[in-house]
Image: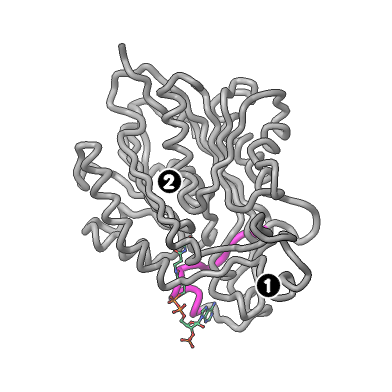
């Protein structure tokens, strides 16, 4: 019996229309375009409009419609929705359920993944497991974030606020009985809750009663805070390590990888990652300049772009990797089949 392979049938991305440049941020906080570019690589990002209610499921819906259309699927073809976000539209229920309804579906199952910057890695590994177990054959994965409504854009929050952008990426995934060496070849996932405080938005919180108070709001305790240096150090240590471990699982070496699509947290992290792997610059994909860090959206958005640019295509072997809040980190190797994918 041929084991099913999880194949990416199509991809899509959606960025909201409000362009926010580094110069724009300079109006609200004590920062400079030079500092942001040099320390993070970010030049601009897209945020949801100030007016109106636009949540992660809304951005996810737009990216999903594009991916579904390119796959030639309707929403009714889906067996499962996996939605990765750290910025759910509401406290509960999950954004996956909200997206399921926005897609016009009645009872299709939807699952939320709260793994922050590794939401894509955990999501794709989960989809692969569901497909291989036979539970689902057509899965929609969505990674989507609306950070902008939850950032402290005063000088106090500048280390975090300058990095993050809003955006969504979506993938249509399908189980295939192919005997070709395509699909998810290997994945490694990790978490270390010991470092939960290194990047945290502590409220509203079920462990607090009430979950949030006016005083907490005044103190800004609903905003994310980050020990940036520590997260940076963990990323440059774990990313090469988990890459080699995943290559070994797949029986590959680094020269077999055509492109690395890392999570886009800081261009300096990915440059350090590239140097540690001793790979040429063109094998490491960057787009943080244009979008900032879109967390669960970052890898699927970058994948959609890399396919659009033709940097990867049929038979390409791609390694995805990332580290973020949790902390969580991981890597996943995917090989495209020989036939063209409908992105
Ligand atoms: O995707 C989620 C995972 N997150 C990450 O991977 C983020 C990892 N960390 C980072 O990317 C970096 O640590 C940051 C970009 C967050 C900060 O860069 P850094 O080079 O580590 O700066 P720092 O925190 O050590 O701060 C250096 C200085 C400080 O001033 P003093 O104390 O030296 O006077 C900060 O107050 O830079 C100051 N600073 C800023 N200055 C201008 C911090 N943020 C800003 C800012 N504009 N936006």
Mark number displayed over residue 220:
1
Q: Residue at x 50, y 75 (%)?
A: 36
249 vs 79: above or below? below
Percent x, y of residue 279: 24, 56
Q: Secondary structure at mark 1?
A: loop
Is 40 on the left-hand or right-hand side of 20? Answer: left
3 vs 117: above or below? above
Is 163 on the left-hand or right-hand side of 17? Answer: left
Residue bounds of the magenta highlight: 34-47
Q: Secondary structure at mark 2?
A: helix
Mark number displayed over residue 306:
2
Percent x, y of residue 155: 62, 80
Work out whether residue 224 or residue 250 is closer to the camera in this orientation and state it.
224
62 vs 104: above or below? below
46 vs 80: above or below? below
The magenta stretch spans residue 35: yes
Q: Residue at x 23, y 57 (%)?
A: 277
Disc 1 crowd, CA 10 A, few/some/many (<14, 14-19, 20+):
some
Q: Quadrant of residue 129?
A: top left
Q: Is mark 1 within 8 Å of ligand 1?
A: no
């Amino acid at each position: 019996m041929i084991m099913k392979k999880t194949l990416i049938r199509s991809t899509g991305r959606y960025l909201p229309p409000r362009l926010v440049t580094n110069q724009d941020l300079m109006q609200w906080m004590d920062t400079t375009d030079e500092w942001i570019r040099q320390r993070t690589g970010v030049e601009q990002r897209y945020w949801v409009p100030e007016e109106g209610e636009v949540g992660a499921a809304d951005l996810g819906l737009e990216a999903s419609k594009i991916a579904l259309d390119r796959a030639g699927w309707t929403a009714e073809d889906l067996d499962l929705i996996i939605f990765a976000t750290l910025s759910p539209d509401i406290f509960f229920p999950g954004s996956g359920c909200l997206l399921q309804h926005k897609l016009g579906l009645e009872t299709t199952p939807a699952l939320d993944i709260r793994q922050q910057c590794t939401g894509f890695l955990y999501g794709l590994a989960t989809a692969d497991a569901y497909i291989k177990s036979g539970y689902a054959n057509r899965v929609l994965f969505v990674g989507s974030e609306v950070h902008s409504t939850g950032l402290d854009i005063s000088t106090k929050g500048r280390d975090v606020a300058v990095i993050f952008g809003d955006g969504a990426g979506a993938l249509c995934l399908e189980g295939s009985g192919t005997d070709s060496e395509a699909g998810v070849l290997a994945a490694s996932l990790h978490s270390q809750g010991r470092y939960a405080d290194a990047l945290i938005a502590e409220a509203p919180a079920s462990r607090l009663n009430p979950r949030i108070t006016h005083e907490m709001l005044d103190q800004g305790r609903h905003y994310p805070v980050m020990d940036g240096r520590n997260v940076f150090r963990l990323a440059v240590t774990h990313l090469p390590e988990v890459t080699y471990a995943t290559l070994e699982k797949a029986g590959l070496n680094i020269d077999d990888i055509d492109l690395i699509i890392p999570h886009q947290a800081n261009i300096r992290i990915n440059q350090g990652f590239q140097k540690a792997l001793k790979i040429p610059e063109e094998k490491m994909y960057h787009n943080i300049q244009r979008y900032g860090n879109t967390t669960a959206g970052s890898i699927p958005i970058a994948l959609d772009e890399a396919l659009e640019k033709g940097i990867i295509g049929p038979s390409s072997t791609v390694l995805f990797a990332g580290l973020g809040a949790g902390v969580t980190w991981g890597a996943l190797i995917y090989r495209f089949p020989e036939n063209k994918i409908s992105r």
